[in-house]
Each structure stands twice: as C-alpha cells, then as structure tokens.
Image: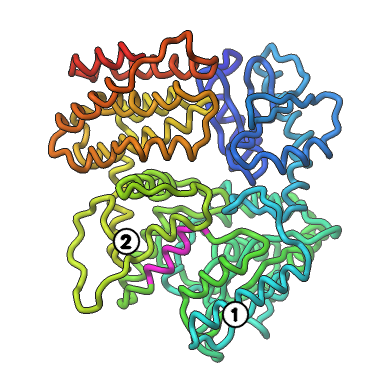
Amino acid sequence: MPTLTNKETFEKFAQEHFPGKITKWAQSYCFIQSGTCLGSNLHYEFHKGRVQLHIEGDNYRPVREWLKAHLKDSEIQSVHWNRNDCSWVLDHDISSEQELYNAFLAIRDKIEPVISDFETQTNIEEKSANPCADKANSRDAMDAAEAQSRMAVNDADEHIEEVELESAKTLRELFAKNKFYLRIPDYQRTYCWEERNVYRLWTDISELTEAKPYHLGNIILYRQNQNDAWDIVDGQQRLVTLTLILLALGEEENCFSLADAVFESDAAVAYIAYNKYLINGYISTLSDSRRKEIIRLMYDKLQFSVLKLTGGSLDLAYTFFSNQNTKGIPLSDYNLLKAHHLRYIGEEKQACHIASRWDMLVGAGYESESDMKITLGLYLYRLRKWMKKRNWNENAPYRVRDEFEAAPVLQEVPPFGEKFDFYESIQGGAHFFAYSEHFMRLFKMYQSTDEHKALANNFSGESHWKYRDVIDSMLFGYYLKFGSQYLSEALLCIAGRISFHRYSNGRVRLDSILSYANESEIVLMLDQATSPTFFLAELKDSISRQGHIEDDALGPIQKRYRKHFDAMYENVLNGCTVESIKNIISSYE
C-alpha cells in the first residue's frame, strides 16, 4: 500500500474533495476517478512516487488526442505506457502525506477543466453506451436522425397518435404550466438521490454562466390522450431535485406541479427531507442578488432533450428515445428492461411495488454503480452466452436489454414456473424482476466468499482485470450450482485453465479472452456435472493436457501475472482440501 497515508484517510480526503467519484485503494497504488466519460478508466493515480492522470481501456483515443492538443502546462509531462494506456505525470516531489494530497488537488485543478471542455464539446454525458465516441453535431444530422426514428416508430405501431422530440428545451419552457402539467406516475414514485448526486448537481448549477447552455440529459413524457397531464417516464430524480433547489432559493411562483407531489414511500420522504437540508446548507451564504441570478440561469441555461409521446405504447417510447438520442444521456439497458417488463403486469399495485423494488436494486443518480450491472450485465450475460456457445461484442449497444427481454412464447401454451437457472428463458413481467432479484441476492452472498476476494484483490492491475472478470463470471456460475462446496478448488481449476491464454499470448484483447473462455466449454462442463467431483475432475484433466510454459518463455507482463496467480493460490490454499488439485496447480504455476 502507499506508505505515505492509509486507506481511511485517503477515502475521507476523496469524499471531501472529489465527491461522487470512484476511488480505488490497492497494495501499491490508489486512484480517484477523473471526468465522467470513461468511468474509473480515467483517473488520478498515486503510483511509483508520482501522482498521474491515467487513461485506460478501449475508448482512450479521443480524450488522449484532446489532452495532447489542449493541455499546456510545464508541470505536467505526457508519458506513453503499455499499448493502449496513456499517462500525464505531475512533476511534484512527494515525500509526505500533505504533499501527496496537495498533488491530487494540483493535478485535478490543472487537468479537470480540459477534460470538462472535452466532454462538453463532444456532447458526452456520463457513461454512454459508446463513451468518448464522436457525436453528430450538425443540425442536418439531427434532422435526419429524427426523421429516421419517426419513420421507425410509425412503422412499429400504427396506434401512435403523436411523437415529438425537442432537443433543446430549457427548464423555463419545461416548467411552463401553460404548456406542460407534469406529474409523477405511481410506478415512478421512488426518489432516492444521495448526497453525492445532489452535491454534483448543485455544483454544476452554481457554475452556470451566460456563455453557454448546460445540457442535463433526457426527459421522457407520456400521456394517454390530449387531455391528460404529462407523466414523467424518465427524469424524475433530476426534476424533483431541481424543484427542491428552486424552492430553497425562494422561487415558488413558477415551480411546476412536482412541488405538490405526494410520495408514499417512507424512504423517498426521508431522501427529500435530507436533501432539503443539504440544499439549504449549500445556499445559506448566498446573497439575495446571487440567488436571483442562479434562478434565472437555471431557467434559461439548463437544457434537456424532451421526448413527448401521446397515446401508443410506453415501451415504444423508450425504444424510440434510445434510437433517436443524439446528445445527452442514453437510456440504460436497465431503464429499458424496466419499461419493457412492466407492460406485462396488468395489476397496477403489483406494478408499482415491483417498480419500487427494481429502483432500489438498480440505484439512481448520475454515476450510479450497482451490483445489478455486474450480476445481470456481466456475469449472468456471459454465462448465458457461453452456455449456448455464442460469441458476442462486449461493447454492442443495448446487448443486455436484448438478452433479457421477454422470450417468444406460443400463445396456446402458457409458460410454467421458474426454476431460476441462469440460462432459462425470460418470461415477460414479474418473472424477470424475480429472476433479477434472486441472482442479485446470491451475488451479494458470493461477494463475501474468500475465493471471490482472493481473485479480486490479486488481479486488479494492468490488463489482469480482464482475466479476473472472466474467471469470476465462471466461478459465480459454479457457486450458483454447488454453493461454497469445494469453491477454492473450483477457483484454482478455472483460473488455471483460463490463465493458459495469458501465458500463451503476449498481447491480449478482451474479445479474444471471452472467445477462449467460450471454446474451453467450462460452463458446459458445469451444466452437465451432477456433483463437484465430476466438474473438477474433467477440468483438472483439461489443465493437464494444456502443458506447462516455463518462466523463461514468458514476457514481463506474463511473469507479473503469474506472480499474482501465485499470491491468489496462497490466499486460498488453506481452503483447498483436494491434494491432487493443489499439486497440479502448483506444478503448472
């Protein structure tokens, strides 16, 4: 671990000075997320005695080129390391804890404005389906996209009465009662923004200027007919929080109907009460003139892309908006799945209850990271694909939505009860929500195992995480079938089999690792095994057939990977009771 400080002090510092950002504390480094477009792959890192900006992953090129062109600072040096990764090193000597934290603040102050300009100029908002990709900014491109999407909607559902997209609607226009009367439908009344979300929104608002508008994402509004109020299908977290801010600033006359919304959930009421307290604290020192200025800037400079759908299908509204979206925050697979499966539930109270539970599982906010994305979007997704011997594109848009939409059925034959096998067909409606919650619960239990921790703790650096996630996906599949019985042995065997790919290849891509895992047929072995002994024996024989690669034949990164494997092996050795597996793994490592 970094010797100048400790994990608790580091996390306290990050929470105070980098609120809402992802952090990581490891044995030899620590980091804090920068920007938004690459998640934790763009971060400030203390490593080898220097604080640096690191850009990692597959979508590094646009932000790298932007920094090369716009970051001009004599104290920051650009360094290329590894094949796809880039680093900007702050030239500050660090010999004390205070110097370490001063360096984090210094590099943030120098680089963050440049990254913010990059995200604004390229219309990137948070974690898009294709982060840091070039956007179509011309009016012609937007018009063409809108026309194409409108045609797709009309072809898909002839009962649509009206679909309208307004790509630059100000908050003043959105809150105008003579044009909109907004309400929160029952199935959306789960307000759960946490302090970091509120703080970040307030920070963005307090930095508004006359110079340019600030795009705050997408809003979806729906009404059954021309006489109804507009239901907020997507965007209630932001709109409720904006209402709380306006009310705290003293603006009551023009606040729309959300100010009168009734939240029945005790949790939602508690969040609203606490966030009122936070907001009042943020604005307590502002003068009256400054409050009025902020109100005006909020109304005139905050902009949204607003989809208005009258009649037709709510599910179609989500589909239309995801196709149409040319700027702002694309709807996540989980929002799309929520809307898709809710339409299968005819009982209103049941739909409201299930929607509330789903929101708690997924979480809400600008940068919400939840176990749902790992459980459903990574591990179960991969297991289901491997089970069918199918390859896939990990970066394909809406791949998770497509995988977990309702499976086709014969109208004459009803679907029968759930077994909750990870690979079973997804029934539309309540089955999907129960399926998701079931595996979320098991995943939380799995996360507490020593085997998962040993894997996570030893394979986080460099490109090792790609193998870690593949191995962890398969080990989770084993856990789903056999629980914790012989879990250490399963980890060693799965890791031994998959790691052969690392030792056999100098450069690796995630898609090649996934394909190798698919060809290994480990998931098929697991499905066919009726006891751990059959699975472990078959996998042990498979490892024997691979052969051993001597250290002299390995490159530097492969040798470092083997050291991490050895450390993981030592971590779980006491839990492994099968001597033949201990011996074969030690002989091949």
Kind of residue sitting beneath label 1? Met
Residue 432's disc is 2
Indicate the colouring scheme: rainbow
Of residue 354 and residue 281, the one placed in the foreground of this image is 354
Q: Position of residue 507 (x, y in %)?
A: 55, 27
Residue 283 showing in the rendered view = no
Kind of residue sitting beneath label 2? Phe
Residue 151's disc is 1
Q: Position of residue 414 (x, y in %)?
A: 20, 73
Residue 403 vertical position relative to residue 39 in the rendered view, above or below: below
Residue 580 left/right relative to 319: left
Query: Dot 2, how many residues are within 10 Å of its Cα: few (below 14), some (14-19), or many (20+)?
Result: many
Q: How many marks?
A: 2
Residues rendered magenta in the picture: 332-342
Alpha carbon separation for disc pair 2 and 1: 30 Å
Mark nearer the N terminus (2 vs 1): 1
Outermost residue to the top: 552
Q: Is residue 579 magenta?
A: no
